[in-house]
Image: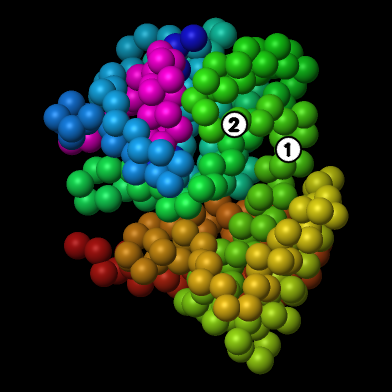
Amino acid sequence: MKILVLGAGGVGGYFGGKLVAAGVDVQFLVRPARAEVLARDGLNINSPLGDVHVHVSTTTKATSDFDAVLLSCKAYDLDSAMEAIAPAVGENTLILPLLNGVRHLESLDERFGLNRVLGGLCHIGVTMTAEGKIQHLNDLQRFAFGARSSNQVEAARTLHRVLERGGFSPVLSEAIMQDLWEKFTFLTAYAGLTTLMRAPIGAIMAADEGETLMRELLEECVKTASANGHTPRPDEFNTMISILTEKGSSGTASMLRDMERNSATEHEHIIGDMLARARTAQLHAPVLRVALANMQAYESMRSRAMP
């Protein structure tokens, strides 16, 4: 099976690199500057689970069909990503997106057809250093995907057998849309309040109204998920509460780290989309409204400051 990985940054570089190390036929679609670094230094992963150094195949322009495309871009880059991978998508190509949220599925379905687009997600702490190395920050490497239609089931099983060789224990989910909505629900609350307060969870919990606000925001997200047919399962909900109200936690959403770097964020794809779905369901969502307004104000200031 031939797999194309869009990008060789944190997520794509980590999972793609692990697959290359296991002998899977992988090519990375990257920008010219990244291709030069990879040609010179190879792909380097520093991880508590074991370092990886591999020489990889790269291209700056897809020119032929692949069996599967691993899509790990930021949501705001989705349009350009779809253009980039289009030449690699043939009649039987599977597209496995690892983007946050759920809105991207509609765009991918419209462009490539529902039958080609799987559901997928990952939970992993990774970053790319200034030298172009992939730094795995802890031992978390959750990777799950699954079929979104009955005619994808067998092809998803075949892809799963290949991905298993990478050693990161991918899960072939039978309820991938439920999994996606549970991550979407958690992430919206996590990103929404840590960006609004410009603070980690522990600091928010130290505020008099911090836990109350977090619980209110999570409740708005849960009601929205329920209105869309995806009420979080009890165990998953308990995990969300545990993480989002942990006293002393240094945890922050990556969206806050993007803000601290004065970078673009996925706020419209995450917080904005959740609020839009709450409004469609005619739900009252005051904390979501404030969280989105905060991010839109940040983006307005960021855009003005850019040359």
Compared with 222, 290 (above or below) is below
**Residue 86 in view here:** no
Which region of the structure is painted magenta?
Answer: 12-34
Q: Nearer the viewer, mark 1 or mark 2?
A: 2
Q: Residue at x 55, y 16 (%)?
A: 162
Q: Is residue 306 left or right of residue 229?
A: left
* Residue 274 horizontal/vertical position (percent): 67, 57
- Is 105 covered by the magenta stretch? no
State which quarter of the image contains the C terminus. bottom left
According to the image, label 2 marks what residue? 169
Residue at the extreme bottom of the image, as rendered: 208
Asked if the residue under mark 2 is in contact with the one under mark 1, i.e. CB atoms within 8 Å, the reply is no
SS at mark 2 in the image: loop
Q: Residue at x 33, y 65 (%)?
A: 262
Q: Residue at x 60, y 87 (%)?
A: 206
Marks 1 and 2 sit apart, C-alpha to C-alpha, by 19 Å
- Is 15 covered by the magenta stretch? yes
According to the image, label 1 marks what residue? 177
Amino acid tagged 1 = Met
